[in-house]
Amino acid sequence: MGKSTYDQGMHVRRSVLGNAHVDKASGNINSFNADFQNFITNYAWGEIWTRPDLSKHNRSLITMAMLIALNRKAEFKMHVKASFNNGVTVAEIKEVIMQSALYCGLPAANEAFHSAEEVFKELGIEIK
């Protein structure tokens, strides 16, 4: 990992989201969104995701639950896909969605199940 917050953030961002995702986002940087991309790399990935008291695995689980609560389908799907890079299992994703059903509501959980299954299909993960 690099020494700057940005370098640390980019390292974590790549390890969680994957090089293809980060390369695509980086390739889309322009004068309008450059400040935002710098912000999320420094702050979200370089300062929060690098904190030592939660593992990336646990951060993935928490992030998915919050995205369900906020009804952020695209971000949820991105983090479901990314969670496998942090050792999250299909069973754990199911439990996050079940827990979210209790606290976020059935419609939110229903959509999350459909979204997760879309990601599983995209990744070739067979659910029986």
Image (cartoon, helix red, strand yellow):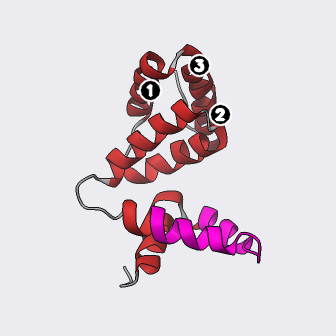
**Residue under numbered circle 3:** 110
Q: Earlier in the sequence, mark 2 or mark 1?
A: 1
Range shown magenta: 20-44
| In front: label 1 or label 3 | 3
Place of residue 23 in the rendered image (x, y in percent of width and height, measured from the top left): 64, 71
Q: Is residue 99 magenta?
A: no
Q: Nearer the viewer, residue 107 or 24?
A: 107
Q: Are marks 1 and 3 in contact (CB under 8 Å)?
A: no
- Badge 1 crowding class, 10 Å Cα cut-off, few under 14, some 14 to 19, many 20 or more, is some
- Residue 45, quarter of picture: bottom left
Q: Residue at x 51, y 51 (%)?
A: 82
Place of residue 64 in the rendered image (x, y in percent of width and height, measured from the top left): 48, 39
Place of residue 33 in the rendered image (x, y in percent of width and height, measured from the top left): 71, 69
- Badge 2 crowding class, 10 Å Cα cut-off, few under 14, some 14 to 19, many 20 or more, is some
Name the quadrant of the N terminus: bottom left
- Residue 24, quarter of picture: bottom right
Q: Residue at x 68, y 74 (%)?
A: 34
Q: Which mark is residue 118?
A: 2
**Residue under numbered circle 1:** 94
Figure check: 101 above or below 54: above
Local secondary structure at mark 3: helix
Mark 3 to mark 2: distance in Å? 13 Å
| In front: label 3 or label 2 | 3
- Residue 90, quarter of picture: top left
Q: Earlier in the sequence, mark 3 or mark 2?
A: 3
Q: Nearer the viewer, residue 96 or 37?
A: 37
Q: Would you say 32 lies left or right of 64 here?
A: right
> Which amino acid type corresponds to the residue marked 1 in the rendered image?
Lys
Q: Would you say 112 lies left or right of 101 here?
A: right
